[in-house]
Image: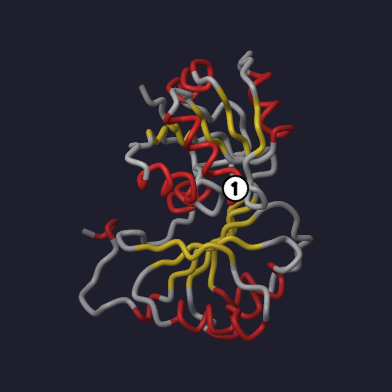
């Protein structure tokens, strides 16, 4: 009889942000496949969970996924976790998910916190229609095109950015669409959690020491369809 593959959401900062179901799944599984075993060990220690840990990350998942699925089909129950948040959302998880489906297995998703959904709520931007565009490109040409495409969207877009690049990124956003409404979500759920809101030009003008992990929300309201209202206005 086959086991199960569980994709388990874990806290993105505050270790209390984990569901009872997620804790029970980690307690009952046979193996935990983790993006970073050292990082996950801290979470397991907090909840007194003692299970074998095996590394499963972006640099080894291609070589390990076939063996992992084979072990599940032999009866092993495996919980897959990333460092933080929901597997497959800008983190390892899609490859084993797809491999499991192709093998006739139905993975079990254990929902929970995500930096994306946290930011959708915290941004204060219109989110009746929104999209997640993953990480901002690093190369200047691709980066400009990325924001030029966002500027034409009729919906709010969320993306991840590095603290080392966010200052220049905000300046580029202000250059491409100065009147767009922007929210910068920093260190979500952590001690230094902060949400900065304003026009792209206003945020680009801030004099900050940018530290932490960031999600940027962008809404170029001028491109929203005529007659379309924010959900809060309905």
Residue beneath the point at 49% across and 62% down: 158
Image check: 151 left or right of 195? Answer: left
Image check: 174 left or right of 180? Answer: right
**Quadrant of the image for the N terminus?**
top left
Residue beneath the point at 63% across and 80% down: 172
Write down the quadrant of residue 226 in the picture: bottom left
For label 1, the SS is helix
Q: How many marks?
A: 1
**Quadrant of the image for the C terminus?**
bottom left
Q: Give the residue pinned by disc 1.
A: 61
Q: Position of residue 21 (x, y in %)?
A: 43, 22
**Colour pattern of the rendering:** secondary structure
Q: Is residue 78 above or below residue 211?
A: above
Q: Position of residue 148 (x, y in %)?
A: 50, 84
Residue beneath the point at 49% across and 50% down: 95
Q: Position of residue 142 (x, y in %)?
A: 59, 82
Image check: 111 left or right of 17? Answer: left
Q: Is residue 92 above or below residue 199?
A: above
Q: Residues within 10 Å of mark 1 (few under 14, many from 20)?
A: some
Q: What residue occupies the far right of the structure in this picture?
A: 209
Q: Is residue 131 above or below residue 52?
A: below
Residue beneath the point at 41% across and 42% down: 100
Q: Position of residue 34 (x, y in %)?
A: 62, 36
């Amino acid at each position: 009889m086959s086991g199960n593959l569980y994709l388990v959401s874990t806290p993105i900062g505050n270790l209390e942000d984990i569901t009872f179901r997620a804790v029970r799944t980690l307690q009952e599984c046979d193996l935990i496949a983790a993006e970073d075993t050292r990082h996950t060990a801290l979470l397991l220690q907090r909840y007194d969970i003692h299970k074998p840990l095996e590394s499963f990350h972006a640099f080894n998942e291609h070589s390990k996924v076939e063996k992992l699925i084979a072990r599940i089909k032999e009866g092993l129950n495996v919980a897959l976790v990333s460092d933080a948040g929901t597997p497959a959302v800008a983190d390892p998880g899609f490859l084993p998910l797809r491999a499991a489906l192709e093998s006739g297995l139905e993975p079990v998703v254990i929902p929970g916190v995500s930096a994306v959904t946290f930011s959708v709520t915290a941004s204060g931007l219109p989110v009746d229609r929104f999209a997640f565009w993953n990480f901002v490109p690093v190369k200047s040409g691709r980066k400009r095109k990325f924001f030029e495409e966002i500027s034409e969207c009729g919906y709010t877009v969320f993306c991840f950015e590095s603290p080392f690049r966010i200052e220049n990124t905000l300046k580029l956003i202000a250059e491409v669409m100065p009147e767009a409404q922007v929210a910068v979500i920093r260190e979500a759920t952590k001690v230094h959690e902060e949400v900065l809101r304003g026009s792209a030009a206003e945020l680009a003008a801030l004099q900050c020491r940018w530290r932490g992990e960031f999600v940027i929300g962008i809404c170029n309201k001028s491109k929203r369809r005529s007659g379309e209202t924010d959900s809060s206005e309905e």
